[in-house]
Image (cartoon, grey):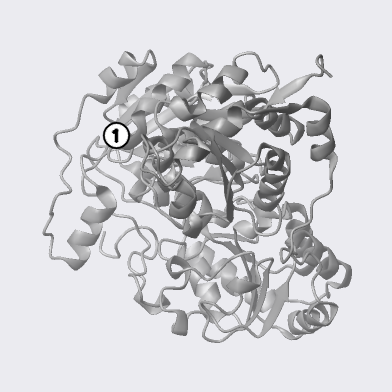
């Protein structure tokens, strides 16, 4: 047995990831993961992308996952390396993004002794992971990794963290024993996602659809998680029921379809919000009645009965009382509904919606001077790309304008932090998406505030030759906070002025990226098409109107009767 082939724990990690289909990983090295990086040096089945901050790494893995529907993976060392992942893990958890987060840990003998760079990352992340593990035996590592991947990618997806002490990474077991352990079947007591909807509830739902006069589908991110966009489209075309989408549901149904109403909620289209307010039946598909959608939950959809379809039973009835709950995978439930979808005429309802769409179509303020406004930039981008682009946004006004003025015809085409609202997300998410989709056009639309939180990740764009187009919407403000201070705090602009911004063009050039500034409409018209058609990365700083506001807007906690700026501009503009 002296010549028996042995395998280290660090190598087991890489072998398992490869067998599970993970071929790319984003990470940042450190002492507690040196054995893993030593194995990565010669392990050709996985390509490592060297982030410039651990938060960048986890957002990059997140963008990879959001743009593909697959599991994203990231790697960080112990202590501060692990804690730097926390915001990104929480971002993924809030939006149900499947991530496999690998952290190094101090050696087992040092656990609990306040060793150098020790942190209880398992304890810290309990509330923001779907599950997490501290590996205590090398022989458990293959099972744990298989379980972690399975948990992350099934049911309601989410991030799973695996913390691996340094001594476990260095220990060895026979390769044959590793193979045998890996092939063993595992079972997870108490984890049994329900995939098939209850037939009786589906039958009741069909009857409610048949009896309805004003039905509306509200499609959320659950459609994308279940890969159910084709089934949703089939259902809509069989029934002629219009579709409003949550922010994270954009792309679950073609935005250019005649029955698409765009985004619903605080900054959603007026016609989507009016439709919800007048509907007598809501089919809530993979959405959770978030406060940014409902405003005042008691007054949301006041005339409607509600069918709520979700794979997570904990979401049903949590924020809104439901008439017919259906727990199950949306792909399966919609397949069942399609088999029995009734032929009903909603002519009067569709006429009303068509009238609203015409009366309240989104527009923006036409400036007499040459100053750029963000809505115009995004509208012009949309005319050129025609909805065939992946867009990652940061958080703030530009995020809402992107949701309003860009058309999302394809699934996994908008990557944005919905539940957490994480500034700094956009650029690294775009990088992850470009890695996952090398032949697709990827844009990052960011603000001048959020960009400064993670712009060190520009180095990956240069190092790995990623042709991401970065649009910095520079209004020299933390725009969304300023808007709220204007509307609700008598224009007391407290700590939102970004007049002392750095030179973004010099920053882009310092990272070796072609950079251009658009200062007026002439610049936009002259350069935009060339920028979007370029085969290389371009950083574009757009100097825009400083105090432009996002409309329509339903103030927080209010109902549809309180909409301001119903057509995208204030009524007196």
Instruction: Assign the C terminus to one quadrant of the image.
Output: bottom left
- What is the secondary structure assignment of the residue under circle 1? helix
Question: What residue is drawn where x is 40% and y is 53%?
Answer: 421
From the viewer's perspective, is residue 531 above or below residue 150? above
Give the x, y percent position of residue 283. Answer: 66, 73
Foreground residue, 57 or 284?
57
From the viewer's perspective, is residue 339 above or below residue 346? above
Question: What residue is drawn where x is 41% and y is 61%?
Answer: 267
Q: Quadrant of residue 207?
A: bottom right
Q: Residue furthest front?
A: 2
Q: Which residue position is annotated with label 1?
A: 452
Give the x, y percent position of residue 183. Answer: 84, 39
Foreground residue, 252 or 109?
109
Asked whether residue 417 appears in the rendered view, the answer is: no
Q: Quadrant of residue 555?
A: bottom left
Answer with left or right where residue 30 lies relative to residue 354: left
Instruction: Assign the N terminus to one quadrant of the image.
Output: top right
Q: How many marks?
A: 1
Q: Residue furthest right?
A: 339
Give the x, y percent position of residue 234. Answer: 79, 59
Foreground residue, 283 or 104?
104
From the viewer's perspective, is residue 474 above or below residue 3? below
Question: What residue is drawn where x is 73% and y is 59%?
Answer: 232
Q: Quadrant of residue 485?
A: bottom left
Answer with left or right where residue 549 lies relative to residue 215: left
Answer with left or right where residue 93 lies relative to residue 56: right
Asked whether residue 178 appears in the rendered view, the answer is: yes
Would you call the spot at circle 1 few (<14 residues within 10 Å), some (14-19), or many (20 or more)?
A: some
Foreground residue, 8 or 67?
8
Give the x, y percent position of residue 197. Answer: 79, 71
């Amino acid at each position: 047995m002296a010549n028996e082939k042995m395998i280290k724990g660090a190598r087991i990690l890489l072998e398992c990831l490869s067998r599970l289909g993970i071929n790319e990983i984003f990470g940042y090295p450190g002492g507690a993961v040196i054995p893993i990086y030593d194995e990565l040096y010669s392990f050709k089945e996985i390509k490592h992308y060297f982030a410039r901050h651990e938060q960048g790494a986890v957002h990059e893995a997140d963008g990879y996952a959001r743009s593909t529907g697959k599991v994203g993976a990231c790697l960080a060392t112990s202590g501060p390396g692990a804690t730097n992942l926390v915001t990104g893990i929480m971002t993924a958890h809030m939006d149900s993004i499947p991530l496999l987060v690998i952290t190094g840990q101090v050696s087992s003998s040092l656990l609990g002794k306040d060793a150098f760079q020790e942190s209880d990352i398992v304890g810290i992340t309990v509330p923001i992971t779907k599950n997490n593990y501290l590996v205590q035996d090398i022989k458990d590592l293959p099972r744990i990794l298989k379980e972690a991947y399975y948990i992350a990618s099934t049911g309601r997806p989410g991030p799973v963290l695996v913390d691996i002490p340094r001594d476990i990474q260095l220990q060895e077991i026979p390769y044959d024993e590793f193979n045998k352990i890996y092939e063993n079947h595992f079972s997870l007591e108490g984890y049994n996602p329900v995939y098939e909807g209850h037939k009786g509830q589906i039958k009741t739902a069909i009857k409610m659809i048949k009896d309805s006069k004003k039905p509306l589908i509200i499609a959320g991110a659950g459609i994308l998680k279940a890969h159910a966009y084709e089934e949703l489209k089939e259902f809509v075309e069989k029934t002629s029921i219009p579709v409003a989408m949550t922010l994270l549901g954009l792309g679950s149904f073609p935005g250019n379809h005649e029955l698409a109403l765009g985004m619903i909620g605080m900054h959603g289209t007026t016609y989507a919000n009016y439709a919800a307010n007048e509907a007598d039946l809501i089919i809530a598909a993979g959405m959770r009645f978030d406060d940014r959608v409902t405003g005042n939950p008691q007054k949301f959809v006041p005339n409607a009965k509600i069918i709520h379809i979700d794979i997570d039973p904990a979401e049903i009835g949590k924020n809104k009382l439901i008439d017919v709950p259906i727990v199950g995978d949306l792909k399966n439930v919609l397949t069942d509904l399609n088999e029995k979808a009734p032929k009903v005429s909603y002519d009067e309802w569709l006429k009303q919606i068509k009238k609203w769409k015409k009366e309240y179509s989104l527009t923006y303020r036409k400036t007499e001077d040459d100053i750029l406004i963000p809505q115009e930039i995004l509208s012009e981008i949309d005319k050129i790309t025609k909805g065939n682009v992946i867009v990652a946004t940061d958080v703030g006004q530009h995020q809402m304008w992107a949701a309003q003025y860009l058309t999302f015809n394809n699934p996994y085409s908008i990557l944005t932090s919905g539940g957490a609202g994480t500034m700094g997300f956009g650029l690294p998410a775009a990088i992850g998406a470009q890695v996952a989709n090398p032949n697709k056009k990827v844009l990052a639309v960011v603000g001048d505030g959020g960009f400064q939180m993670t712009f060190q990740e520009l180095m990956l764009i240069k190092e790995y030759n990623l042709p991401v187009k970065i649009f910095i919407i520079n209004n020299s403000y933390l725009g969304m906070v300023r808007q709220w201070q204007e509307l609700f705090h008598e224009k007391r602009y407290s700590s939102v002025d970004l007049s002392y911004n750095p030179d973004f063009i010099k920053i882009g050039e310092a990272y070796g990226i072609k950079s251009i500034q658009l200062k007026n409409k002439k610049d936009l018209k002259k350069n935009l098409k060339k920028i979007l058609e370029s085969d290389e990365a371009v950083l574009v700083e757009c100097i825009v109107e400083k105090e432009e506001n996002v409309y329509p807007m339903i103030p927080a906690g209010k109902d549809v009767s309180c909409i301001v700026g119903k057509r995208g501009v204030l009524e007196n503009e």
